[in-house]
Amino acid sequence: MNEAPIRTGDADRIVRGAVIALFIIAWSLLLPGRLAEPATQTFADDAGDYHNVAAHLVREGMYSSGGIVPTNEREPGYSIVLALIYTVAGIGNRWAIFFAQAALQLIGAVVFMREWARWSSPRSATIAFVFLLLSPAVLHLVFFAYREAIAGSFMLLWFASLLRWLRTAHWPAAVAAGLAGGAVAMTYMPLLPLLLLVPCICLLLRDARLQCAVLLCITIVPLLLWVGRNMQHPATAECLLGGCTRGAAAWYVRSRQVTDLALWDPPRCLWAEYISHDIRRLPAACDFGVLAEHPLPVDPALRRIAERAMQHEALGKIMEHPAMHLWTSLWWLAEFHLPYVNGWGFAYNILETIATATLLLGALLAFVRRRSPLLLMTAVIIIGSATFAMIDVEPRYRMPLLGAYAALASLGFTKHRTNR
């Protein structure tokens, strides 16, 4: 099938080139400061877990945080990427990590922009490109060892390949969509519900059922391999997809919120976390520190039993208070769409607040002006934000979905009709 070329104006080409140049310049200017920080700061908290697993993958070939007992608490995608980087550049090479993450973001943004131009317009694609490369939060994340740093890039590749497959019904696009979907699933397990959109799309495509089947199989294979690996180890056989400790903790906190918080407490919690930074007069359930009131046993076997009991009890309490769970979830949904601030000081917070407000305004305008926003992007935002709002929320968790928001915002800020 011969595809008609997309005519891109000189202004759009100049802007896109300038965006790439600004992204590279900003990364280069920020790099020395990030490398000057202690490595212990770079690999602290969650980042430390991914780094340790990657180091043991390189040294012993074992997916383990300690090199002794196999563990699957964290999904393997990001640690595998780090292990590949460490194999080439050395364990803990932060320059290589930051370079690889910036390169992935640039590649994902370029690939997505080229496909989005065919579904919308060259001008819309250019606007989306600006959001994907010059948003302060993007430049913030490429310098952190978090799974969000590459999950967003994988999502952009998934969007682009899926859109290309829907447009052309070509086998390479179907295979690429399957590979990208599998990478997303293995890197960010909470995004698994989004992959259910693929079989829903397949039900509408009667002429591409074989391609649909292959796409789904390619997507699922990495998950099946991960589950099969975990079934072979006693330490992981009871938690095949991982995240059981964190899942139990999240449900416990949510159960405490539906029982301990009053109706007016959720907005007070958000105000304290993002504005006043004073939680002294707030219920303990506002913060994950409430977990300290429910310590778990140190022994692994007893710990697993306690986790299952804690999660079962927590879900029971939530089912007893569905209205309060919905009420708190609505406030956490608002938190999900707050700017990703408190990263690099006041100037960064202001710029990120402006960028986030502009992004959300554009997405809203796409609906108000009836720009026919693509159903796929709308579904991704609804499913993704609802999933996090019901379980656990931080504005950082929204970053893998940036491509969907940028796509809708690009429609809201253009007067051109979409091509599809």
Image (cartoon, grey):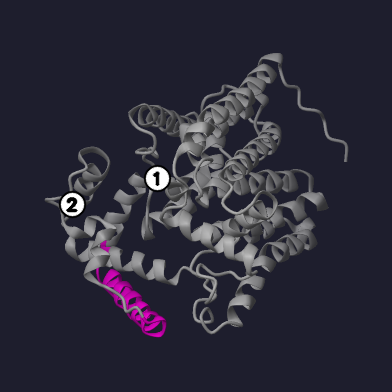
Q: Secondary structure at mark 1?
A: helix
Please name the residue shown 37% across and 82% down the image: 299
Determine which of the numbered discs, if any, sits on residue 60 in the image: none
In this rendering, position of residue 394 left or right of residue 239: left
Image location of residue 298, percent across then percent down? 34, 78
Q: Is residue 420 visible?
A: no
Q: Earlier in the sequence, mark 1 or mark 2?
A: 2
Determine which of the numbered discs, if any, sits on residue 395 in the image: 1
The quadrant of the picture occupied by the N terminus is top right
Q: Specify the amino acid type for callout 1.
A: Pro
| Quadrant assignment, res 122 | top right
The stretch drawn in magenta includes residue 298: no
Query: Is residue 179 placed above or below 29 in the rendered structure?
Result: below
In this rendering, position of residue 277 left or right of residue 13: left
Q: Magenta stretch?
A: 299-324
In this rendering, position of residue 237 left or right of residue 298: right
| Quadrant assignment, res 411 | top right
The quadrant of the picture occupied by the C terminus is top right
Q: Which residue is mark 2?
A: 265
> Gap between marks 1 and 2, in whole Å?
19 Å
Q: Is residue 328 visible?
A: yes
* Between 324 and 60, the one nearer to me in the picture: 60
Please name the residue shown 57% across and 32% down the image: 133
